[in-house]
Structures are given as structure tokens and as C-alpha cells.
Image (tube, coloured by chain):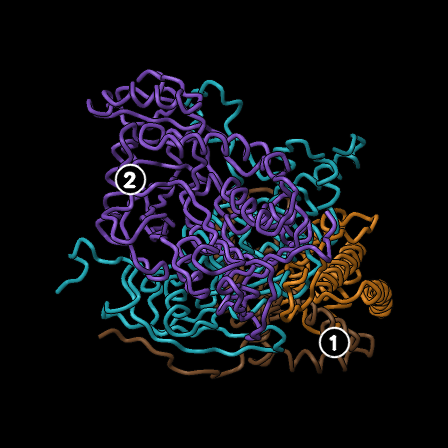
Chain colours: A brown, B purple, C cyan, D orange
């Protein structure tokens, strides 16, 4: 006998028809280019936030040697070093993906963009590992 | 065309190619027109058809009436709907000795039906279509073409609406309003449900046209009349890749799987034929699918190894009594039934026919409708160039 | 009995196959602010598509289900949907190949809804009409074939089937409806590539707009979603190359192309 | 069109119309790409100069002051600040514009960002001047 039935009715709220910001950030159903787009936005915003933070922190330099050297001793803590690795990741991803987006955006190597993305990410991963080792060993 | 507020109101049930063409024809003659369709427009047989603009050659030998109708409508459609066809002509190819023996009769019948046929040698045919089976013996070129099965009818809907017709998709006719008269009963309206809102309401009508295709029997039953429509499904197979520029037909008496219609990046092979009771329950039998591939590859060998994109069935609305043994015995031509002799006034059914003859079917139906409503305006759809399909969404 | 060994076996069966499947179907009526999901259970065969399943649900379980469909072979573009969060044509998406016991079916996103799974394509065509692109293209198939007598030129329909999947998948259209969007931009590139009576300069000026080709952020989701190999993202990038090289050439003293 | 009675979020109407801005955005994109490329070069120089040239990287106050005593370094760092500010603010503007605000709001964003950019660069110049004056 065939199984055929209405199982349930009106179970939960459905998504709005215009996806809005979910169209950027909802990872479900995303493919490579979509992930690159999301990460490009997140790393761009993150690096920009760091830029502002960095500029504010640098104002300590204007307050003289004791203020600055006090901060530097905090910045050498392991937590800060982890933060540095995240920053390097952001810079590497945004920069390397930016190379792809720029070339593709001018209509260059469009049909090889996926391979280019993979190649750039491999370069980025190697650079990130090297940078992380440098940060934790040299300090 | 301005709507005449005092003009009779005609409700058309069925939003396929026929319904759209009837709406266009009646709107041009100045009637008030409302068309209802239970789903999306062209969601029945119309959208599912092969996409073949017939030259009529297929029917030239056995059904001269259909052949003449086809070539006439083929010429008219090219004129009134430019851009809706791939105009690459068709090639009928003879593969077996029997096919070759059939060629003289076929060729003469085409000419006798006013179809501009041209004899093509084996060498020329293979130069025209390098993917053809090299074993072909000879071929005949005729003015077939590829139709966009949805967008051509959409142009009729778009034009009808520009001329004042109201088109209501997702609106299902669920009952006819009947009034008793001295001669029997009269249809005076249609009860519909708007499926997008769930609202049920009634549309008053001076006359109702049943353009339900294979569903015409079900719609007629709402008015308590019986129409002899036999749903006759056929299987179609679309494969990826375009193996011919022209429509490739087998040069023989009509059979199964003997037409390959190129369309966009697909080749569509069809079709088979059997009889069904309910157009809402169509099957896609495995053996029919296999037959499409094997028959199609007899003409174009590459089809045997092509990737199948889709397989589906479409139900032809054939005119005939239930109990006929095979769909192919029934005439392909259309008929318009005025149900007044059945004791039901104000109700007309148009059915049968095929996509190529949709305009002619509409003309016949509109002539009956206008005669009944005493509208003197003649049919103008032979010359009236249709709006583009995009106009429907404006 | 192995049903598929039967030559008359219905390859698109929606009953008595022994393969039950659940469909979570988005429901929404005209005028509703938000929708909900209904769940249905039917049985499917190996070739049964999401569209077959939905039509079976409408025929046998719930006649109020509203959906668009027409050709059943992905050439009309009406049955585009989001199935398990991906944009697909329901008519060529086999239920069992999705590999999930429950299949989520939603209408395409970023477009107005008529009800349930049916979208209103007015916005889609408003974008298209701005380009005024041609419907037909010169045939680029079988170049070694000779031309039949009496046929002026090979032609064929444009590959785009106007389904709207690209607009549904595009992250930019998701948040800003003013963006011209992938389908119309792909049409623009076609119109410049093969004008057939259109003015390529005017089309290029139209897409060189803040809401035109430059809104694209190169996510390539449109090209991934396209069921008809149009590659809208590639077309957008080609347009940008045309626009940018024109600008740079004019900067270097040449005439703006 | 009569049949659209459903929820219609963000309808664009029956005809898509270009925004009609005279300034073509091609230049915006070209400048964003060029500034991106410059940032890539300058950020690499910045990192190398700050973390690899001096053993163990720039650390204490004296290191920083010594670093900035070289006029070439000052020029490079100021260029870096200008370019990265340009690229960052233009990028943030592009993200905000994807929200589909009104044209008036978009004009306001552009103006605020222009002022912000000038302020950031001015702050950087002041900071550089202050530090170098310790020398």
C-alpha cells in the first residue's frame, strides 16, 4: 500500500521572501564563490575595525614612552598573539581574494576564477602557517 | 481596442494555447473576456508539448485536412509572432528501404497539400546535418520549425490583455451557474476559487467557452454535458546537446519516437501514444522512454549516448468516442461543439487540434461564439501581430 | 517484485513504489505577512522529480497548493524553486538524488510571491525590458553543417529561460532590489555581443550604472544556480571589462568605445 | 499588474530605471582596485619594516621613534595610511550601500565618510609629527 499523507500543518515560521542580509550570510546552500563573498566581507570589516583600533592605540605614542611601553608588554601576551594570527588571516584572505576579485572584476581569467581562488588560498594557508610560527617563536 | 461596457461577457475556462488564442480573438472583436486557469498559464498540455511548428508534412499522406490546416497556420504564425520560432526548417529522412519506397507518395502528398517540400539527396542531407545516421537513403526538406511551447501562447495572453481581456491564472472553475430556460438550461456564470487567496466567487457570463484541452470532459461535466474528448498521452524525452539545426523527422507513416526537435541546448525526442482516462494521472512508462531513445538514435546515432535531461508525458486532447483502440486512429483536427442541441445554452467547447493550429481553433470557436451572441465583427487574428511575451508581465 | 524490471513501470510514479519521502512545502496565501511549512508524505520512483511530487500532492492531497509549472524539461523556466536551500528547476531535480529523507521546498527568493511556491515575475521582466534584449540568437551550432536552401540564417532561442533562479541566489539582490541583477546583465552582454538592431553603446551606458554591472560582488552564485548554462557572472565580468577598458582608453586620450 | 496581490517586498515597479547618476561607477571600481593593489604592496612593506627589519620587530618607544626618523619611512607610512583609509572606507560604503538605503541616506553616508577619511589622515599626520618631534 502506498504511503501518502498530509503529515503536519503550519509547523513553523517561514523565511521572508526577500532574503535581505540572510542572502549574504546564510551559509546554507552556498557554493565556493558565495563563501568567498561572505569571508571577503567579514575580513574586510574586521581588518577595517583593526585599522581604527590600531590608530587609537597608536595615540599612546603621543603620550610618551611610559604609556607605549606599558601597552607593548600587554601585547606580548599569548591572547594578543592569537589575535595577531586572526588579523594575519584576515589580511591574507582579503588581500589574496582581492587579487582574484580584481582580475575577475576586470573580466580577466573569469573562466579560471575557481582554480585561481584555490591556488591563492593555498598560498595564503602556507603564509598563515609561516606567520603564526614567526609570531609565537620570535614573538 | 476599447472595452465595450455593454458588450457581452465571455468566460473562457482553460489557460492553454487554445484558451489564450480564443481570448485574443474575442477581445479583438470587442467582447468582454475573462479567462480562468486553475494553475499557471500553459501548465496543462500546452507547455508540455513537443515544441514543433508543424509544416503539415507529417499528416500529408493520411490526413490531408490536418496537413493543409498546418501549413496555412504555419505561415500565419510566422507572420503574427516573429521571434517565437526557430526557423530552421525540417528534414524528413528515409532510413529503411520501406521508408524510401514511401518517399514518392509522401513528397507528392506534401505538394498536393501546398507544403513547399524539396527533395534532398543523401549526400546533401548529410552535409546539412552531419550527425544524421549515415545509412539514410534520401530526405525531404519542409518548413517545420521549433516553437517555444510556453512563450508563443503567452503572446496571445499578453495581446488579449492589452485589448482589454482579464486573465486569471490560479483560478479554478469549480461549478457552472445554470438557469432554467424554456428550451432547457443555460450557463450564466462560473464559480471559481482563487487558489492564491482561497476566496470563492462567481463570475457572471453571457457565454462560457470550455477550452480545457484534455480536461474539457471534466469541465463539460460541470455543465452537465458530455464531450467526446479522449486524453491521449505521449512520452517525450529531452537530451542534452543539440545534434541538429533542423527538426529531424522519420520519413514513414506516422509512428513513435520519430521526431527530434532541437530547442535551445536540448534535443527533444517524441513521442508515443496511448489512451488514458484522467489527464491528471499521467505515467512515464520505462519502455516508452527506452523506445524514444532507440527510435531517436535510429535517425541521429549520437542520441543513444546523450545525457537525458528530462522525461515526461503530455496528454493530447483527441476528439473521438471512448473505446477507440489507439490514439493514432483519431483525427488530429479540432472541433467546436455548441452544446445547445444537448439542451445546454450558453456553453461552447473547443477541443482537439494541436499547438500549430491554436489560432485557427480559436477562430472557429470565436465564430461560433459571435454567431450565438450576434456579434458581427469578423476575425482579425490572421494579420494582427502579437505583443511580445514579456508584455504579459507588464 | 522488482518494479523497475516491469517494462511499463512508471518511472515518475508518485505512489506504490516503496520509497516514502517527506516534503516540507512553504505555504503562503496572498496578503499574508509571512508563511509556514506544511509536511506531506508520498512515495517516489527513481525518476520522480520534485515537480512530479508537488503536482501529485496538489492532485491527491491538497488542491490548494499553488505552484508554477509548464514544460517539464527546464525550457520554460516556470518551476524554479529553492529545494533544500539551493536554487533548482523542480522539473529536472529528482527527489531521490537529493539524498535527504525530508525535502524542503520554498519559492525562489527575492521576488514577489503570488502564493505558496508561485512567484510573480513582473519585477524580473521589468529588469529584462530595460535592456530590450533580443529573444533569438544566431545559431552557433554545428558550424560544419551547410545551410538548407530557403533558410536565411540559422537561428535559435537565447539560452536564458527567464526562470529567476539567478536573482534568487544573488546576495546583492537579496538586500537591494534596485540592482539590475544577473539575468538582465547577461542579456545586456548578449545584446552587445550580438546587437541584432539594438544600440550596443546605449546598452553599455545603461549597465555602467551604480545599480548595473558594478553592483556585482563576484560571488558567482548566479552562474552556479543557472540551469541553462548562461553564466551570468561571466557575462557581468565581460561587461565590466568593456566598460573599464572604454574608460581607461578615454583616459589615455583615445575615443570612448 | 492586477494579479500581484501577494506580499510584495521591495517591488521595483514595472520598469527598471537606471539611477541616472552622471558619474559612472566604473571609476569607483577602478580606484578601489588600484587602491587595493597599493594596500597589498604597502601593507607588505609595513609588516616587513615593523617586524623583520629590526630583530624581534619594533618594540619599545625608542624603536618607533628611531624608525620614523627616516623620511622615506614617513612618506611610505603616510601613503599607506591614505590608501588604506581610502580603500577601507570605500569598501565599508559599498557594504552599506548593499542594504538598499534611500538615495538621500547614501549621499549622507558618502559625505560622512569623506569627512571621516580626511579626519583619519589628519590624525595620522599629527601623530607622525608628534612622534618624530621626540627625536
Residue B137 appears left or right of B164: left
Please determine whether, in this image, residue D117 is positioned above or below residue A99. below
Residue bearing the label numbered 2 = B257
Residue C217 in the image, given as x and y percentages of width and height:
63, 56
Query: Observer-nearest residue: A19 or C136?
Result: C136
Label 1: how many Cα within 10 Å (few below 14, some 14–19, many 20+): few
Q: Position of residue B218 (x, y in %)?
A: 40, 62
User: Which residue lies most toward the left here?
Assistant: C1
Say which residue appears at 60% left-offset and 67% top-offset.
B203
Q: Position of residue B380 (x, y in %)?
A: 63, 38
Vertical position of residue D50 compared to residue B260: above or below: below
Label 2 CA crowd tier, 10 Å (few <14, some 14–19, many 20+):
many
| Residue at screen point 25% across, 49% down | B324
Chain at numbered mark 1: A
Q: Is residue A88 visible?
A: no
**Callout 1–callout 2 Cβ contact below 8 Å:** no
Give whichever of C225, C245 is nearer the camera: C225
The count of marks equals 2
Q: Which residue is at a point 41% across and 23% down the rendered structure image? A: C145
Q: What whole-number distance in Å separates the C-alpha atoms at marks 1 and 2?
A: 77 Å
**Residue that badge 1 annotates:** A57
Dot 2: chain letter: B
Q: Secondary structure at mark 2?
A: loop
Mark 1 or 2, which is nearer the eye? 2
- Toward the viewer: B280 or C167? B280
At which x and y percent is residue D54? 65, 63
Locate residue D31 relative to residue C110 in the image: left or right.
Answer: right
B341 lies left or right of B101:
right
Q: Quadrant of residue A20?
A: bottom right
Amino acid at each position: 500500500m502506498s504511503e501518502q499523507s498530509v503529515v503536519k500543518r503550519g509547523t513553523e515560521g517561514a523565511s521572508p521572501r526577500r532574503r535581505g542580509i540572510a542572502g549574504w550570510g546564510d551559509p546554507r546552500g552556498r557554493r565556493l564563490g558565495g563563501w568567498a563573498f561572505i569571508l571577503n566581507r567579514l575580513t574586510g570589516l574586521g581588518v577595517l575595525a583593526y585599522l581604527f583600533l590600531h590608530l587609537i592605540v597608536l595615540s599612546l605614542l603621543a603620550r610618551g614612552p611610559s604609556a607605549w611601553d606599558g601597552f607593548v608588554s600587554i601585547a606580548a601576551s599569548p591572547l594578543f598573539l592569537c589575535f595577531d594570527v586572526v588579523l594575519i588571516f584576515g589580511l591574507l584572505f582579503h588581500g589574496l581574494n582581492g587579487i582574484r576579485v580584481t582580475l575577475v572584476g576586470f573580466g580577466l581569467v573569469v573562466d579560471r576564477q575557481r582554480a585561481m581562488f584555490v591556488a591563492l588560498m593555498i598560498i595564503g594557508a602556507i603564509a598563515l602557517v609561516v606567520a603564526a610560527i614567526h609570531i609565537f617563536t620570535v614573538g | 481596442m476599447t472595452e465595450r461596457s455593454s458588450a457581452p461577457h465571455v468566460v473562457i475556462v482553460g489557460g492553454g494555447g487554445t484558451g489564450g488564442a480564443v481570448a485574443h480573438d474575442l477581445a479583438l472583436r470587442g467582447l468582454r473576456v475573462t479567462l480562468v486557469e486553475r494553475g499557471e498559464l500553459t501548465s496543462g498540455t500546452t507547455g508540455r508539448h513537443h515544441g514543433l511548428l508543424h509544416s503539415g508534412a507529417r499528416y500529408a499522406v493520411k490526413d490531408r485536412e490536418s496537413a493543409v490546416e498546418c501549413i496555412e497556420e504555419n505561415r500565419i504564425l510566422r507572420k503574427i509572432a516573429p521571434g517565437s520560432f526557430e526557423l530552421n526548417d525540417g528534414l524528413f529522412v528515409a532510413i529503411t528501404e520501406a521508408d524510401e519506397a514511401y518517399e514518392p507518395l509522401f513528397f507528392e502528398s506534401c505538394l498536393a497539400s501546398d507544403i513547399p517540400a524539396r527533395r534532398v539527396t543523401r549526400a546533401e542531407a548529410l552535409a546539412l546535418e552531419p550527425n544524421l545516421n549515415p545509412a539514410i537513403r534520401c530526405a525531404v526538406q519542409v518548413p517545420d520549425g521549433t516553437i517555444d511551447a510556453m512563450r508563443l501562447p503567452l503572446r496571445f495572453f499578453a495581446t488579449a490583455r492589452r485589448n482589454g481581456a482579464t486573465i486569471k491564472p490560479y483560478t479554478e472553475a469549480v461549478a457552472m451557474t445554470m438557469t432554467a430556460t424554456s428550451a432547457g438550461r443555460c450557463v450564466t456564470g462560473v464559480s471559481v476559487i482563487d487558489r492564491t487567496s482561497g476566496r470563492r466567487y462567481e463570475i457572471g457570463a453571457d457565454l462560457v467557452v470550455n477550452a480545457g484541452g484534455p480536461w474539457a470532459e471534466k469541465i463539460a461535466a460541470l455543465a452537465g454535458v458530455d464531450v467526446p474528448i479522449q486524453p491521449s498521452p505521449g512520452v517525450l524525452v529531452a537530451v542534452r546537446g543539440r545534434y541538429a539545426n533542423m527538426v529531424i523527422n522519420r520519413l514513414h507513416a506516422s509512428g513513435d519516437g520519430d521526431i527530434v526537435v532541437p530547442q535551445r541546448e536540448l534535443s527533444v525526442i517524441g513521442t508515443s501514444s496511448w489512451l488514458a482516462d484522467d489527464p491528471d494521472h499521467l505515467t512515464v512508462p520505462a519502455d516508452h522512454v527506452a523506445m524514444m531513445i532507440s527510435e531517436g538514435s535510429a535517425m541521429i546515432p549520437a542520441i543513444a549516448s546523450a545525457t537525458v535531461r528530462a522525461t515526461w508525458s503530455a496528454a493530447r486532447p483527441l476528439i473521438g468516442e471512448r473505446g477507440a483502440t489507439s490514439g493514432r486512429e483519431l483525427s488530429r483536427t479540432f472541433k467546436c461543439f455548441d452544446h445547445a442541441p444537448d439542451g445546454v445554452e450558453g456553453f461552447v467547447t473547443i477541443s482537439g487540434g494541436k499547438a500549430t493550429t491554436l489560432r485557427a481553433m480559436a477562430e472557429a470557436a470565436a465564430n461560433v461564439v459571435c454567431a450565438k451572441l450576434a456579434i458581427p465583427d469578423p476575425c482579425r487574428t490572421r494579420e494582427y501581430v502579437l505583443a511580445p511575451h514579456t508584455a504579459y508581465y507588464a | 517484485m522488482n518494479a523497475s524490471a516491469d517494462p511499463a513501470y512508471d518511472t515518475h510514479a508518485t505512489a506504490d513504489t516503496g520509497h516514502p519521502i517527506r516534503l516540507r512545502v512553504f505555504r503562503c496565501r496572498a496578503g499574508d505577512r509571512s508563511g509556514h511549512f506544511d509536511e506531506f508524505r508520498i512515495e517516489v520512483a527513481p525518476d520522480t522529480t520534485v515537480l512530479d511530487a508537488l503536482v501529485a500532492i496538489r492532485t491527491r492531497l491538497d488542491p490548494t497548493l499553488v505552484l508554477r509549472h509548464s514544460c517539464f524539461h527546464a525550457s520554460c523556466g516556470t518551476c524554479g524553486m529553492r529545494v533544500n536551500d539551493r536554487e533548482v528547476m523542480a522539473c529536472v531535480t529528482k527527489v531521490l538524488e537529493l539524498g535527504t529523507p525530508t525535502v524542503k521546498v520554498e519559492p525562489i527568493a527575492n521576488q514577489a510571491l503570488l502564493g505558496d511556491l508561485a512567484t510573480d515575475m513582473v519585477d524580473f521582466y521589468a529588469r529584462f525590458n530595460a535592456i530590450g534584449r533580443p529573444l533569438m540568437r544566431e545559431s552557433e551550432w554545428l558550424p560544419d553543417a551547410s545551410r538548407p536552401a530557403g533558410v536565411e540564417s540559422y537561428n535559435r532561442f537565447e539560452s536564458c529561460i527567464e526562470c529567476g533562479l539567478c536573482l534568487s541566489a544573488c546576495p546583492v539582490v537579496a538586500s537591494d532590489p534596485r540592482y539590475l541583477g544577473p539575468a538582465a546583465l547577461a542579456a545586456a552582454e548578449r545584446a552587445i555581443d550580438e546587437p541584432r538592431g539594438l544600440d550596443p553603446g546605449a546598452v553599455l551606458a545603461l549597465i555602467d550604472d551604480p545599480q548595473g554591472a558594478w553592483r556585482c560582488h563576484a560571488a558567482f552564485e548566479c552562474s552556479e544556480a543557472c540551469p541553462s548554462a548562461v553564466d551570468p557572472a561571466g557575462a557581468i565580468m565581460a561587461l565590466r571589462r568593456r566598460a573599464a577598458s572604454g574608460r581607461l582608453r578615454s583616459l589615455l586620450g583615445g575615443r570612448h568605445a | 499588474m492586477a494579479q500581484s496581490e501577494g506580499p510584495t517586498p521591495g517591488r521595483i515597479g514595472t520598469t527598471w530605471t537606471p539611477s541616472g547618476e552622471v558619474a559612472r561607477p566604473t571609476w569607483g571600481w577602478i580606484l578601489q582596485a588600484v587602491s587595493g593593489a597599493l594596500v597589498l604592496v604597502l601593507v607588505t612593506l609595513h609588516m616587513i619594516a615593523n617586524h623583520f627589519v629590526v630583530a624581534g620587530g619594533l618594540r619599545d618607544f625608542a624603536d618607533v621613534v628611531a624608525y620614523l626618523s627616516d623620511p622615506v619611512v614617513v612618506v611610505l607610512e603616510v601613503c599607506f595610511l591614505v590608501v588604506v583609509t581610502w580603500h577601507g572606507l570605500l569598501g565599508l560604503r559599498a557594504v552599506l550601500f548593499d542594504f538598499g538605503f534611500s538615495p538621500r541616506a547614501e549621499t549622507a553616508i558618502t559625505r560622512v565618510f569623506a569627512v571621516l577619511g580626511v579626519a583619519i589622515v589628519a590624525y595620522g599626520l599629527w601623530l607622525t609629527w608628534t612622534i618624530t618631534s621626540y627625536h
